[in-house]
Image (cartoon, grey):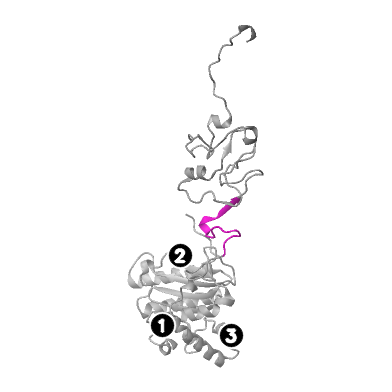
Amino acid sequence: MPRHARLDAPGTLHHVIIRGLERGAIVRDAGDRAAFVTRLGTVTAATATPIYAWALLPNHAHLLLRSGPAGLPRFMRRLLTGDAGTFNRCHKRVGHLFQNRYQSIVVEEEAYFRELVRYLHLNPLRANRAATLRALDRYPWSGHATVLGQSRRAWQDRRTVRGWFGPTAGRAGRAYRAYVRAGIPRGRRPELGGGGLVRSAGGVGRSAGAPAPAGPPGGGSAEPGEQRLRRRAPAGGRGASGGRLAAGSHAPRNGGGDGAALPARGGLRGGAHAGRAARAPLRGARGAGPAAGGETRPLPGAGGQPPGRLHGGDLEDPPEARGVKKLTKATPSPNPGYS
């Protein structure tokens, strides 16, 4: 099936996740790590893409960046294609290095910028690549040391990150480190893969611990795969509960009454034909409703009635339910003179 277009425009804030094929390594040694970080800096400067936070792990990497004038796809294509070629040449291998497409999540900046900077920079500590926060302060394969001023990388935008923590470099550095320290006991943060972040595949991501979105007025399912349609019966009808219809009136083709919720076409496929008979109200013979002394009959296939034919996806009434008289042999008149 076709792939969804990414949500991107110049100036959009993204959380980008890169994973190795079959959860394999994307870097094997210090030379691979240095080559990845060098290429990241080169492509960042060439495309004017601000990088605020990043972390490189053995089998995946995180980036918090803002799309430059060239856009996110061009930036990532230059980064990943070049790095895969370098890695394959160094290790004498062929084929893909990265798993599928990279994942990009559009970030709600006011609510999540600081959280994501901390989350990304704590990745090496959670993965046991750095034993303590003091070791993380000097860890060379994430942006944490650059924000603190322990390392120099001109392509990383540490000024913007510090601006979220204080008006001066000293105060901002201390506040930032205290903020990172406070996040250590919180461990992994699965909600930062969804929560208030808008996924590039479309829609709002929601983690397992986040509250479900409010349902539609009047109840019903709020799940995206089970959109509901609500239809009202015509005037004089009682709806899908099985009440009688007024003389001459007919049930809607899709059945339903006041407040009846029906699944949208193209949704669940199982039991489609059985569902039509089960959800339809009683339908009377044409022109012979209760007011005219006629008899109401259930739809074909329900209540023991013989099933009708399929026509355009709906069940037709048998001839007797449509008021068609059965032809019988004529009885001769007892008085031929008055026949």
Spatial CA span between label 1 and label 3:
24 Å
Which label lies toward us, 1 or 3? 1
x 57%, y 62%: residue:
215
Q: Secondary structure at mark 3?
A: helix
x 53%, y 72%: residue:
14
Query: Residue 80: within the magenta?
Result: no
Quadrant (top left, top right, bottom left, bottom right) of the C terminus: top right
Contact, CB < 8 Å: mark 2 with mark 3? no
Residue 1, image x, y percentages: 47, 54
Residue 269, image x, y percentages: 47, 48
Could you say which disc has been placed on residue 163 in the image?
Answer: 3
Spatial CA span between label 2 and label 3:
32 Å
* Residue type at tag 2: Arg
Label 2, on which residue? Answer: 101
* Residue type at tag 1: Leu
Q: Secondary structure at mark 2?
A: loop
Q: Residues within 10 Å of mark 3 (few under 14, many from 20)?
A: some
Position of 87 with respect to 105 (left or right) is left
Q: How many marks?
A: 3
Q: Against 276, is 199 above or below?
A: below
Q: Residues within 10 Å of mark 1 (few under 14, many from 20)?
A: some
Which label lies toward us, 2 or 3? 3
Residue 205, image x, y percentages: 52, 67
Query: Residue 221: within the magenta?
Result: yes
* Residue type at tag 3: Gly
- Write the start and end of the magenta stretch as one range: 214-230
Label 1, on which residue? Answer: 125
Q: Residue furthest right?
A: 235
